[in-house]
Image: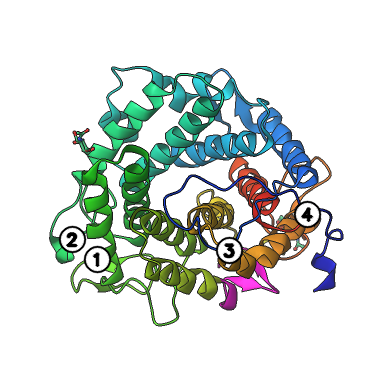
């Protein structure tokens, strides 16, 4: 796999130890924030903003609410890494940001009953709040809006199939991503607020999710449950499911100190890498195909691989352990290399296919662009440099 190595290892700059509660005594962890990698990320983000962002509506052309939320999160994750303010005015002018700044926003109506989409919005609001806090700016509207959305989602838990949050307010489906997100928003909410309700919800969620049968014997979470049997429905194992659960488990580890949660996270992360979700060590969604005139990933599916890399980054932040990080550094390097060599076109837009050069099947959409951006930002922090 020598083609995957972009450049020799350069001197690595260590960044200070995090303030997380657990893991601080583990082997010293290097967070590189490689400046050449972040420079590449900035080129991609600039093209993303100029090609797709509509400053009038505050939305991305051909975007969706939940993918726009991820895109805002990715821009702020990048600014927290670079220390600059390149996209510092985007949040307050965005469709999501304007709703967060308005204390009268009717969130239930704004979010339209989708309990997974709503939690991507929570994650975006928190990341924007982190950025504002890092710049000494008031983030209270973002934090209080995130708390209001969280309460709506917590109210969507019931005893059907023994527990879990419904996928939507229509109460027709219980699935993995909604509940992995609830594990993450609950554990992360506790780390942010120290409010016990969040920690109780995180523990309740993992107890249910881990016993739900949605993770198959291959270590991969399938899409959801068959409500008539309350068993794994055997539907597609998407990449993002395998890492959002890991970032949730990492946050719960950080809250509790129970390192068996990190071992559980590694089951899903390692299963991604060793399964058909990779092709030649590069993430490949089941719908990805580089060839022309084939079935292609839809807008939702185009962002999944980048979410995998982003939540790998968040998992490593909370695991805060050099040996757990070194296990995945090379894989993050490989995704970065593939995004640049195979995903990127001459205009610095990133297509949906990473595993092979585009032969007409790679989709160029805002979701694919921000997916590639997230992979580069994750590699800047935890890959080599
Ligand atoms: C703790 O969080 C829950 C859920 O968001 C909320 O209802 C409750 O008011 C919070 N308690 C305090 C003391 O902030
Ligand atoms: C794909 O389909 C288009 C439109 O039907 C056609 O013009 C093109 O030649 C096809 N490309 C390949 C590689 O088959």
> Which tag is nearer the camera, tag 4 or tag 3?
3
> Which residue is identified by label 2?
163
Q: Earlier in the sequence, mark 4 or mark 3?
A: 3
Q: Earlier in the sequence, mark 2 or mark 3?
A: 3
Quadrant field for ligand 2: bottom right
> Which tag is nearer the camera, tag 2 or tag 3?
3
Residue 281, position in %: x, y?
68, 72
Q: Earlier in the sequence, mark 1 or mark 2?
A: 2
Q: Nearer the viewer, residue 142 or 229?
A: 142
Residue 34 in view of the camera? yes
Q: CA distance from mark 2 to mark 4?
A: 44 Å
Residue 380, position in %: x, y?
70, 49
Q: Which of the labelled discs sits on residue 385, or is there none?
A: 4
> Which residue is identified by label 1?
207
Q: Residue at x 73, y 34 (%)?
A: 47
Pointer 1 residue Cβ closer than 8 Å to ligand 1 = no
By secondary structure, the bulk of the magenta-drawn segment is best described as: loop
Q: Is residue 240 left or right of residue 353?
A: left
Q: Secondary structure at mark 2?
A: loop
> Which residue is identified by label 3?
27
Q: CA distance from mark 1 to mark 2?
A: 10 Å
Q: Residue at x 26, y 32 (%)?
A: 108
Find the magenta span and give its range: 273-289
Q: CA distance from mark 4 to mark 3?
A: 20 Å
Residue 329, position in %: x, y?
67, 63
Asked if the residue at tag 1 contacts the one at tag 4, i.e. Cβ–Cβ closer than 8 Å, the answer is no
Q: Residue at x 81, y 57 (%)?
A: 341
Residue 169 in view of the camera? no
The quadrant the N terminus occupies is bottom right
- Which image quadrant for residue 232? bottom left
Q: Which of the labelled discs sits on residue 378, or is there none?
A: none
Magenta stretch holds residue 282: yes
């Amino acid at each position: 796999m020598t083609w995957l190595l972009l450049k020799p290892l350069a001197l690595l700059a260590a960044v200070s130890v995090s303030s997380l509660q657990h893991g601080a005594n583990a082997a010293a962890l290097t967070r590189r924030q490689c400046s050449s990698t972040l420079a590449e990320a900035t080129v991609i983000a600039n093209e993303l903003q100029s090609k797709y962002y509509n400053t009038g509506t505050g939305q991305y052309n051909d975007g969706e609410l939940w993918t726009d939320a991820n895109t805002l999160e990715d821009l702020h994750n990048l600014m927290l890494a670079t220390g600059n303010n390149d996209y510092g005015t985007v949040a307050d002018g965005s469709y999501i940001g304007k709703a967060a700044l308005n204390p009268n926003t009717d969130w239930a109506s704004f979010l339209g009953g989708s309990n997974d989409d709503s939690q991507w919005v929570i994650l975006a609001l928190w990341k924007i709040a982190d950025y504002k806090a890092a710049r000494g700016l008031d983030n209270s509207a973002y934090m209080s809006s995130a708390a209001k959305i969280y309460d709506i989602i917590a109210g969507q838990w019931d005893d059907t199939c023994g527990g879990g949050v419904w996928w939507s307010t229509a109460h027709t489906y219980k699935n993995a991503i909604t509940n992995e997100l609830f594990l993450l928003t609950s554990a992360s909410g506790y780390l942010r607020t120290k409010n016990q309700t969040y920690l109780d919800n995180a523990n309740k969620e993992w107890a249910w999710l881990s016993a739900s049968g949605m993770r198959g014997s291959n270590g991969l979470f399938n899409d959801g449950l068959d409500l008539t049997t309350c068993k794994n429905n055997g539907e597609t194992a998407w990449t993002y499911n395998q890492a959002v659960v890991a970032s949730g488990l990492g946050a719960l580890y950080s809250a509790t100190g129970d390192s068996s949660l990190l071992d559980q996270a590694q089951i899903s992360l390692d299963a991604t890498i060793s399964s058909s979700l990779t092709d030649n060590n590069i993430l490949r969604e089941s719908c990805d195909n580089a060839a022309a005139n084939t079935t292609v990933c839809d807008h939702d599916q185009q962002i999944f691989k980048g979410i995998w890399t982003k939540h790998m980054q968040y998992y490593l932040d909370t695991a805060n352990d050099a040996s757990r990080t070194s296990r995945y550094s090379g894989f993050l390097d490989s995704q970065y290399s593939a995004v640049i060599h195979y995903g990127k076109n001459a205009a610095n837009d990133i297509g949906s296919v990473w595993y092979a050069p585009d032969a007409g099947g790679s989709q160029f959409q805002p979701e694919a662009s921000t997916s590639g951006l997230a992979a580069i930002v994750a590699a800047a922090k935890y890959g080599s440099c």
